[in-house]
Image (tube, rainbow, N blue to C red):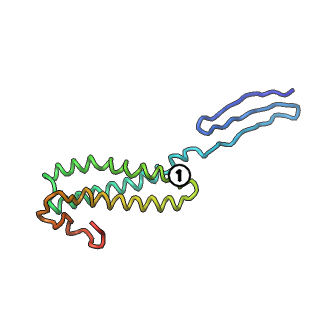
Amino acid sequence: MTGVIGMAGVALHRVAILRIRGEAGEKIVGAAPSSPPGRWLSGLGFGVLFTGLTAVVTVAAIGRAWTACDIGINAAANSLTLLFLAPLIWLAGAVPWVILHSTLGRRHRRTALMTGLVFTMWLTWFLITWLGMPDSYPAPICPGNVPPWWPSFIPA
């Protein structure tokens, strides 16, 4: 006498388990998951960590550049602007990390990590030079709106 006892499925893993009882005893037949669980969000941890640090460093550097070059109305207005920018910078950096690790990171984890780090460094440089050193603002203290502490070997 052969019959199917039951079928159970795990929603995230897409695994089906069948228990078949026959003359030789009970046999369990199952299918492996089609992809590891949570693989699409594997870059989220890296994205949150690295772009969180990027947001903090970028906001601090922009604030220092604005203070050194006397850009803005006052410190309170500048702080509110930077407080508004921090989560946007964090999100703008985290999304590419998730995309990068869910595509390139499947086969080449080191390449994805190095590409993500290069992107994060470029994003930090771009935001500091674009937001922290505006060309349209008059430069009463800093020539060309480049603060005196900015390294000369890094283009502004």
Say if 6 sits above or below 79 in the image. Answer: above
Q: Nearer the viewer, residue 95 or 21?
A: 95
> Taking 106 as reference, is 31 left or right?
right
Q: Amino acid at mark 1?
A: Thr
**Where is the C terminus found, in terms of image quarters?**
bottom left
Q: Residue at x 49, y 59 (%)?
A: 113
Q: Nearer the viewer, residue 116 or 80?
A: 116
> Taking 4 as reference, is 67 left or right?
left
Q: Residue at x 16, y 62 (%)?
A: 69
Q: Secondary structure at mark 1?
A: helix
Q: Residue at x 37, y 53 (%)?
A: 52
**Where is the N terminus found, in terms of image quarters?**
top right
Q: Residue at x 88, y 31 (%)?
A: 23
Q: Give how far across and how far down residue 31 sits, in percent.
A: 70, 40
Q: Give how far across and how far down residue 147 sits, in percent.
A: 20, 66
Q: Give how far across and how far down residue 22 sits, in percent.
A: 85, 31
Total numbered labels placed on residues in the image: 1
- Residue beneath label 1, please? 103
